[in-house]
Each structure stands twice: as structure tokens, then as C-alpha cells.
Image (cartoon, rainbow, N blue to C red):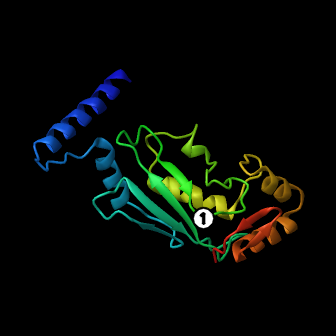
Amino acid sequence: NMIKLFKVKEKQRELAENASNGVPVKKQSAGELRLHKDISELNLPKSCTMQFPNGKDDLMNFEVLIRPDDGYYLGGTFLFSFHVSPIYPHEAPKVKCKTKVYHPNIDLEGNVCLNILREDWKPVLNINTVIYGLYHLFTEPNYEDPLNHDAAGVLRENPKIFESNVRRAMAGGYVGQTFFPRCM
């Protein structure tokens, strides 16, 4: 692992030297090359779209819009930001939900509880896998691995009330003490 770290340091130094000479040589990191491959091979459900807010020069930061076509969240639109590290795929992408959502596996700060973004990440996985994983959180929310314990409890105890809470949140309204902006 030290070797990997050394390579990253070396790369940073190299980029700094290039910048200081005013030479616009931008070598792509291994992570960028791999991400390029992932993006070229994307095979997303039609309910998911990808966008590059900083333009095509910054592939390492992108957004994914998910519009679930099934389940409790049907009709909602949910925005996720992805930040991919230069040592990708040896590190999972960092993913945040930018849409405030009433969901057992996404907290109110936008942190996402998805096993493949944490303990089950492996370098053979790719961006496509992650987006499918996020999509599945909306079609099959999981109360057994909660970040929002209130939502998880309601889903477990009373799916009908959970459904009406989701609808109210997506339409723009309060669930308990929390206000959710409209997202449908």
C-alpha cells in the first residue's frame, strides 16, 4: 500500500512541476482512465441520467439524477453527487444525495447507506453498479440497515404510513418536525 501512496505523491509532484512551468501537460491518473472506461460502458436504467456540472474536463465530479419508475418514490427526482478519487477503483466513489429525502437509508444530510459504497466495495465494481445500487434503494428501501431510524421504524411497523410520509415529503411538506422541499 505504501507503493500506491508513493505513486500518488509522485503524481502530485509531477502535476505541480508541470503547472509551475506553465506547461499544460495534464497526465490522467489511473482513476481517471478507469472512470473513462466505466463511463463509456455505462448501461443505466432509463430512469437514471448522468451530468457533468463542471464540464467534460472534470470527469471525477459528476451528478446522477434518479427518477424511480416504481415503488414508494415513483414520480420523485433525486440528485446525487459523485466524487471519484485519483486512486479509483481502489477506493469507492464518495456519493451524497443532494435532494432532501425521507428514506431509511439516506439521512437528512444526504449521507447514503449502501453496502457497496462501504465494506462491500471491490475494485471490480464500477460506476454502473453504484448507480444501480442507488436506484434499488428507491425501489426497495431497506429498514434493516438504517441511517434515518425514524423512517426505518415506520417502514418496518407500518408501510402504509411510510408511503404517505414519502408522498408528503416529495410533494413538499413536513414529516414530523422536518420540512422536505418538493422533488416531484
Residue at x 64% of width, y 48% of height: 113
Query: On screen, 178 above or below 142?
Result: below
Task: State which quarter of the image contains the C terminus.
Answer: bottom right
Query: On screen, 77 above or below 85?
Result: below
Task: Report the residue that reaches farthest toward the top.
Answer: 2
Q: Residues within 10 Å of mark 1 (few under 14, many from 20)?
A: many
Disc 1, SS:
loop
Left or right of 51 on screen, residue 57: left
Q: Position of residue 170 (x, y in %)?
A: 70, 73
Left or right of 174 on screen, residue 9: left
Query: On screen, 114 above or below 123?
Result: below
Query: On screen, 155 above or below 85?
Result: below
Residue type at mark 1 is Thr
Residue at x 46% of width, y 54% of height: 82
Q: Quadrant of residue 137?
A: bottom right
Circle 1 residue: 99
Between 64 and 39, the one lying in front of the other is 64
Q: Position of residue 139 (x, y in %)?
A: 67, 64
Q: Position of residue 1 (x, y in %)?
A: 38, 24
Q: Position of residue 31 (x, y in %)?
A: 33, 44
Residue at x 33% of width, y 28% of height: 4
